[in-house]
Image (cartoon, rainbow, N blue to C red):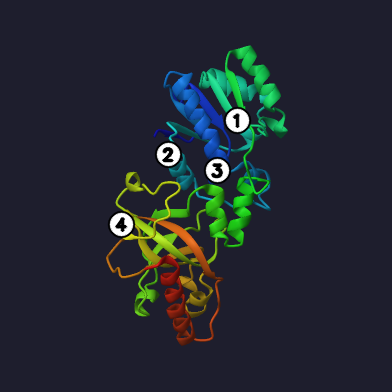
Amino acid sequence: MPVFRSMDDQPPACSVLTIGNFDGVHLGHQQLLQQARLIRDRQANGGDLMVMTFAPLPLEYLRPEAPPGRVGADAMRIQWLLNAGVDTVWMLPFDQQLATMSATAFVQDLLVDRLQVQHVVVGADFHYGHRRQGDVGSLRSAGAEYGFTVHVLDAIVDKHERISSSRVRQALRHGEVERVARLLGRPYNISGEVVAGQRLGRELGYPTINIDVSGWDCLLQGIYAVNVQLCDNKRELTVQSGTDRHSTETGLLGGIASIGHRPVIREHLPERARPGHWLEVHLFDFDQDCYGRLANVLFRHKIRNEMAFASMDTMLSQMHKDCADARSLLGV
C-alpha cells in the first residue's frame, strides 16, 4: 500500500477518497471504509481508494498544552487502514500551512487539482478548512461545481452512544480493554519492533520482550493478560478483526504485559537507566531471542494498575500471582 507523508508529494489520482483522523480505525471508521470500498468496486470501476489523514492529529497541533492522546501510533494507524482494504494513504502533516488553508483552497488544491477525485466519502460531522469553515453542505456544493460525488454516512452507535475515537481513548485511559474491543470490532493491539531492555525480568525468572511506546502519547497503563503474534516483517501482521481465539493454533502466544512508566524499576535503577513509556511482555512457556522481530500485542483483560513495592521480594510475589491470573483468564 503506497503511503505518502508530505504536502509536496504527488499521490496518484484516486477514484474514491475518504478523509479523517482514523485514530484507532474503530467500527464507525470501518463502516465508512466499507462504504468507500463498495463505491470503488461498483461505481468507480475498481479504481483506487485513498484515505487522507493527518499527523499530528489536528487537536495535537491546535492544543499542544492538552493533547487528546492517541489510540495508536502513526505506523499502527497505517497498518489498521491496510487491514481495512485501503489502496493508498496520504498522511498529510498538519501544520500551519494546512491549519490556515481555506475550505475553498482545500477542495480546489487537494481534492480537484492534486487528486482528481470522482467520489468523496465522509461522515455526517465532517468539517474541513481553516476554523472548520467547510462542512458536508459546502462539500456537496463544491462537488456539484467540480464534478465529484459526495457520499455521507451517519455515525453508528453502541448502547445509544456514538462510536468515536474519543470514546475509545476514554476507555483506554481506564484500562477497559474489553470495551475498547467492542468499539473497535477487534482486540486492541500495539505492534512494534522488539528492542533490548534492562534484562531485570530475566534475572527474576520472567524474561520479557520490550517495545518502546514513548514516541506517541500512548494512553494505556497497567498489567494485562495478552496474546502476542511474532512476525519477521509487517506483511505477516495478519490478526484480523473479530478473532477471539486465545491459542497458538492462530499463531498467538499467551503472556502478561506491563505498560507504563515502570515505577518499581524506576526505584531500583540508576538515573541514567530509567526508561520512559514502555511495553514489556512475558510470554508463557517461551524463551527465544526475538530482538529485531515485530511483536503484535493483543490486550485481552486488565489485571491491575501499576504498583510500587517495598521490596523486590514483594514485587516478585505479586508477579507470580499476576501470571497465574493471566493464565487463568487466557486459558493457557
Circles 4 and 1: CB atoms closer than 8 Å: no
Residue 316 image point, x, y percent: 44, 82
Q: Amino acid at mark 1?
A: Val
Say whether disc 2 or disc 3 marks the residue closer to the N-terminus.
3
Q: Which residue is mark 1?
A: 122
Q: Which residue is mark 4?
A: 249
Q: Which residue is mark 3?
A: 27
Q: Height in image: 304 above or below 47?
A: below
Mark 2 to mark 3: distance in Å? 15 Å
User: Residue at image x 64%, y 37%?
Assistant: 155
- Tell me, yes or no, if residue 153 can be seen here: yes
User: Residue at image x 51%, y 22%?
Assistant: 115
Q: Amino acid at mark 4?
A: Glu
Q: Residues within 10 Å of mark 2 (few under 14, many from 20)?
A: some
Circles 3 and 4: CB atoms closer than 8 Å: no
Q: Residues within 10 Å of mark 1 (few under 14, many from 20)?
A: many
Q: Is residue 206 left or right of residue 152?
A: left
Residue 82's disc number:
2
User: Residue at image x 47%, y 61%?
Assistant: 300
Q: Nearer the viewer, mark 1 or mark 3?
A: 3
Q: Nearer the viewer, mark 3 or mark 4?
A: 4
Q: Nearer the viewer, mark 4 or mark 1?
A: 4
Say which of 60 and 298 sits in front. Answer: 298
Q: Residues within 10 Å of mark 4 (few under 14, many from 20)?
A: few
Q: Height in image: 105 above or below 22?
A: above
